[in-house]
Amino acid sequence: MNPLLTPFDIAPFSKIENAHFMPAFVQAMEEARTEIDQITANEAQASFENTIEALEFSGQQLDRISSVFFNLNSAETNEEIQKIAQEISPLLSEFSNDITLNEALFKRIKTVYEQKDSLHLSVEQQTLLDKKYKSFSRNGANLSEDKKKRLREIDAELSKLKLKFGENVLAETNKYEKHLTSESDLDGLPEGEKEAAAQMAKSKNKEGWLVTLDYPSYIPFMKYAKNRELRKELALAFGSKAFHNDELDNQDNVIKIANLRFERANLLGYKTHAHFVLEERMAETPEKVHEFLSELLVKAKPAAKNEFNQLEDFAKELDNIDQLEKWDGSYYSEKLKQKLFNLDDEKLKPYFKLENVISGVFKVAEKLFDLKFEEVSDIDKYHEEVKTYRVYDTSNNFISVFYADFHPRKGKRGGAWMTSYKPQYQRNGENVRPHISNVCNFTRSTPSKPSLLTFNEVTTLFHEFGHGLHGMLANTTYPSLSGTSVFWDFVELPSQVMENWCYEKEALELFATHYETGEVIPMELVQKIKESATFQEGMQTLRQLSFGLLDMSWHGVDPSNIANVKQHETKAFEGTNLYPDTAETCMSTAFSHIFQGGYSSGYYSYKWAEVLDADAFAYFKEKGIFNKEVATKFKDNVLSQGGTENPMVLYKRFRGAEPKVEALLERAGLLN
């Protein structure tokens, strides 16, 4: 019996074998097609219920199977799963096109859409109707047959190219390892990092130490290793992923993806891919995005230049470095930060034992949103390291299942993300609760130390948990409007606002205790964390803006004349460069956010959401960071509402006004 084809609530990971996926996908697609046929064959006049709602609740089994499969392909993949992904992606793309290009179905949707003013729909129903209509019109339902055919070809090709892009980046990351046999090569590295490198070597039956391109290995090495040549080697390996003119090279993939997206947008009547994407964003147009990025660039650039000059002077004074290079940035920034604030991650890490931070983020959620997290062992999981929880509110109502997966593994892509195995929705009088997952790549425990997080990892955990809350607290009628199904430049608000609690004394006292002595983090360290929060903020802002501008340079133009990926990128970075360029590196070939993930024409949204989060947190600060009234407003108007209304309407309902960019500039210390 195929466990994926038996109706399931909790994903039955332990029963699933790779061989189950393909037959499950095929059958679930067939069933979903039958459901669509029933909608189009209905002889009754098209109505909201028999067309829009029926479509919304069709294909649920297929959605569940997809979420299990693609989440595994990110968090616990292997060659077999990757091969299935290559086979299934074009089929799913074809299936989705079969729906959006189904004329009989679109005709019914259009009929309902054209009567919408007389249907007395709720706001959420209106949003659903708009979204369904646009999902067809924006995907070619109004096109002629030959154009529809071309659209299908483009979509099938894009789905394959994006997968290939991601596989190449993962293979490049896994392929590189630096085997060190002399302890002097690890000079400067804290004991815990040395131990982790030794453990990594041991796990591969090697003597000495191993450094890899996974974040928990790469970042500390770049930050602490004295050996400048080794830092250079690692930085060049990291920066040249999928840029070696070999079988794992992504240059062609990048150019093909950009051109296919442009052609697709043109087919649908849009000037560029960015025009197509931004129609469904708070920013609305590429012009607005450029305006927004330019405004921040003007404010951040002078500060960034001053910070860079200060760093360069410091490196010259300390080690007689004449020209600061990319592989020097983290190292000297860390040294300068220690000098200015006497604050180093190694002093902080003992206060951030992973288990304590998890408990801390749960306590913050309890104080703000009345949630309780109960760790349980009866929920099936895809890897023994995954922690599983049932979440309740303080009245003991069941809220959500929560999975947490914290450490790097061979089959897991880098970075950190939130995802869902089951959305929240309401149907037949039942409020079906969601199953949410946070996946991160934090430093593991070693024989002598538990997993101790850097402060950056602490903020990452809070960030992903913010996305998690957006999923867990969802309270909408329709699954496609639930949780994080919001405009892309609004989705980072819940995650980024949560990071603010990491800097507050009242919150830190809940969980930041020394793993050996139990001592609460000293307040002078908290003060230093706050003071150092804006350290090199100008440079950080410039870096984020450069990524946003690179994204727009691929997607906000006609890319057909771009022949050389590196040259194009160099031009895009012109106004934001601080360090000299390195010919061997290229960001675009490993820029997974925009070429594999969903951030194409959307990278600016990190900064956009920072404006929202700075403005939102200013409200909490004004009333008290655990103020129930503000927290409830945030829960009721933002976290629970998903994509049921225009995000600016929801935001203003919470805040009473539109967000102000000044809140961000003030927090970042960029107003002077």
Image: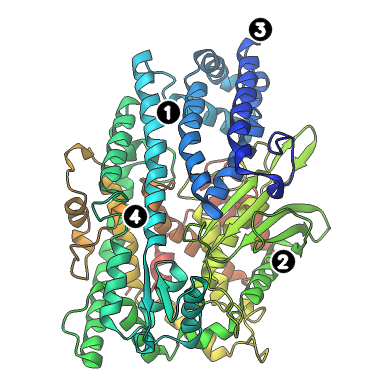
Q: Quadrant of residue 326?
A: bottom left
Q: Nearer the viewer, residue 167 or 614?
A: 167
Circle number at residue 43: 3
> Helix or strand or loop: what does disc 4 sit on?
helix
User: Disc 2 or 3, which lies upstream in sequence?
Assistant: 3
Q: Position of residue 52 (x, y in %)?
A: 61, 24
Quickly name the residue at label 4. Answer: 590
Q: CA distance from mark 2 to mark 1?
A: 41 Å
Quickly name the residue at label 1. Answer: 138
Q: Position of residue 153 (x, y in %)?
A: 37, 26
The residue under label 4 is which amino acid type?
Answer: Ala
Number of marks present in the image shown: 4
Q: CA distance from mark 2 to mark 3?
A: 51 Å
Q: Residues within 10 Å of mark 4 (few under 14, many from 20)?
A: many
Q: Position of residue 413 (x, y in %)?
A: 48, 57
Confirm or deny contact between disc 3 and disc 1 (CB under 8 A).
Answer: no
Assign the C terminus to one quadrant of the image: bottom left
